[in-house]
Amino acid sequence: MTRGELSPAGTAALFQFLRDGRPRTRAELSAETGLARSTVAERIDTLLSSGLLKFSDKANSTGGRPPTTVAFNPAARVVLAADIGATHAKLAVTDLAGDVLVEEDKVLDIANGPEIVLREVCDRGRALLTQAGRDERDLLGVGIGLPGPVEHLSGKPANPPIMPGWDGFDVPAFVRGELGAVTLVDNDVNIMALGEYRAHWAEHEHMVFVKVATGIGSGLISYGRLHRGSQGAAGDMGHVRVPHDTDVRCRCGNVGCLEAVASGAAIAAKLTEAGVPATSSADVVTLARNGSVPALQYVRQAGRDIGEVLATAVSLFNPSVLAVGGALSLAGEHLIAGVREAVYQRSLPLATQNLRIVPLHSGDEAGVSGAAFMVIDHALAAGQVESLLTQ
Amino acid sequence: MTRGELSPAGTAALFQFLRDGRPRTRAELSAETGLARSTVAERIDTLLSSGLLKFSDKANSTGGRPPTTVAFNPAARVVLAADIGATHAKLAVTDLAGDVLVEEDKVLDIANGPEIVLREVCDRGRALLTQAGRDERDLLGVGIGLPGPVEHLSGKPANPPIMPGWDGFDVPAFVRGELGAVTLVDNDVNIMALGEYRAHWAEHEHMVFVKVATGIGSGLISYGRLHRGSQGAAGDMGHVRVPHDTDVRCRCGNVGCLEAVASGAAIAAKLTEAGVPATSSADVVTLARNGSVPALQYVRQAGRDIGEVLATAVSLFNPSVLAVGGALSLAGEHLIAGVREAVYQRSLPLATQNLRIVPLHSGDEAGVSGAAFMVIDHALAAGQVESLLTQ
DNA sequence: GAACTTTTGATTGACGCTCATGCAAAAGTG
DNA sequence: CACTTTTGCATGAGCGTCAATCAAAAGTTC
């Protein structure tokens, strides 16, 4: 009787050991998993020929033949990631480590509706694949971030305020029709949170990410996983009440909403009123960078206001990392300084003693990186790897 | 070659299918799992003899011999659960469905320190076991809730404000020494949240539970799992700022804390000041039940204040259930009415359209029930069941 | 360069788990 | 009582895992 051909479940289980990217020798794997050397060897062979593993450097010899090591091979497949905003999009092809291989910024108008926008994304995606030297058969999946609430399970936008024509549109079905690949969708703040978390803070359990731009939103990571909420609406911060400024009217109809007080749009309005013309977050950032005193003051105060709300989030959610990103965070350290000021003042010592309040480390790649991780986490999870072994 | 004796992993996997308590026939299990009839039969035998399954009613005949059904047997083991408060404790022995078999309320002072308190809990626990007709060998584990922050992984209280002598005490080691059973510990609000969730809202993904008594705290359930936070301090609501009343000083040194405005202690103080003497939450409840107008007004206003903070929690966390419990919630519908008023006013429609704001369904059993579920979930999870099969 | 050490790949038989099958007894229905 | 369906028991085939062995490969040490 010859030895068995393959055990998909067992092989996938071994692969999970190697997901972290650290190279290991066969002997180490045998010891770690408790499997026999022959079993490990056979499974390694399967994984090597599927491409999911690759040979790594030889380890140091201890007097005899040095052991070869094998490691996760991020180049086995690629992911197409799209971070779609209201007026432009960033596309990228990443490897399985979430590292961007090629990327591209595109001007597009989300208001053109899903067919036009998504077809363009798919067309440019194909071009990027080619540019990266890969093709559609290498696609592990497609990850898309959209600027509005998304029901993640179905991939359909849910009552998005700024995406005419997108409500209920079956994004995964459309993209699958174009590119033939599994497609996952989430809102842009969530994928930024995921990208920042997985790229820089994965050893922490809980994180809060806040994006301050034209609007204000946040993403929550609980036990390393995005907390999406029951409507996919978790992280909404824009219409939380700020503990002062209760007279400011918000477009939502309420008063004192954070977005009406501390968003890029709100600051621009305040500046204009103060005689310093500004219409957008970008204007505010430019002014702040050029040393405009009122701009700096307003940005810092916005940081404090946001910090007031984040103090509540910190008390409730008790994260160990609070990351601040979005266009307004590009106006130097003033925003985050205001956030720190308010959070440390308003939170109990227990909640802040191990809390790090940091600017976004990922820069503007956070979105596509997170979209990629969303796909990678799904497709490389336990129970999904088997399908990658046959090919 | 005879058929194999047992496959612990596979048998445990079959058991997970039956965890929901629904009786099933062997044929159904074979179809659901894809396993052969003979394999299912053998595993069922193993589970029956371990006691984890029991025979259930016969299903209806379709013309021939009616199939027997098997179901999860909650009586296979028992759990000792303790919900320890500042001045008294509730102990219970539950079955594996979390149902209370026997229970007991005890007066005790947490300030006596861990040895005295825990020894008494263990002694009474043994008595309760006997009363339930079981003994220590039937113990699946012990679950304990404590009135302060707990590092759940180690089971050690972490800087508890009202538990002198408990800081860093190794509760699981002590209890294991007394009763020889696995012991899990968490704070009392978390176990109440878990108890309420598992007993009444398990089909929902996300829940927020708030306990309003002498203090104010909350427990968060994310994807059916307690979100404990990085210091085990998640859910702290007492020192979140209320968007008005910013002049009220709190014992924590800050101003405008929710606890200084809306807790049972705060209401009692306000009533006393208004000429209606009251010193505790219980006094407030009694007054409110007797129709004291100022008491009703203050309770309702406390509900609004708490609702203001919960509105933020709802926006951020986007639960589908918000459960309100704690001593003050016993003062009729006034507290929850205030909560509803503020939450619905201050939250976006997307977050509230599927939100239910409900009083605690579990009553004062929520704590022990949650402590039991904490143990059950841990011990009956994938990978833990195997150890129960050998015996 | 030779002897030694350690890893690797290939081979083998033993063993245990799962499956499909068959059969007789059990326990109902009509 | 004939019929139907479930159940328990037995059997051999197939497959995966393991332990053991051996020879080749690839370094280190003297």
Image (cartoon, coloured by chain):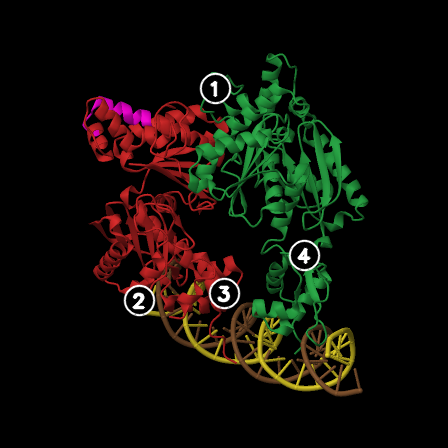
Chain colours: A red, B green, C yellow, D brown
Q: Quickly name the residue at label 4.
A: B388
Alpha-carbon distance for marks 1 and 4?
Answer: 55 Å
Q: Quickly name the residue at label 2.
A: A137
User: Is the C-beta separation of discs 2 and 4 under 8 Å?
Assistant: no
**Do pointers 1 and 4 mark residues of a single chain?**
yes
Chain of the residue under label 2: A
Q: What residue type is labelled 2?
A: Arg
User: Is the C-beta separation of discs 1 and 4 under 8 Å?
Assistant: no
Q: Which of A388 and A302 is in front in this view?
A: A302
Q: Is residue B201 above or below residue B385?
A: above
**Do pointers 1 and 2 mark residues of a single chain?**
no
> What range of the chain is rendered magenta?
A289-302
User: Residue, x 56% and y 50% (percent of image)?
Assistant: B203
Q: Quickly name the residue at label 1.
A: B245
Where's residue A22, x and y in %?
40, 54
SS assignment at label 2: helix
Alpha-carbon distance for marks 1 and 2?
Answer: 62 Å
- Quadrant where the C terminus of chain B sits is bottom right
Q: Closer to the N terminus: mark 1 or mark 4?
A: 1
Chain of the residue under label 3: A
User: Residue, x 43% and y 57% (percent of image)?
Assistant: A18
Where's residue B27, x and y in %?
63, 71
For the residues carrying marks 1 and 4, which lies nearer the camera in this image? 1
Q: In this view, does A354 lie above or below B64?
A: above
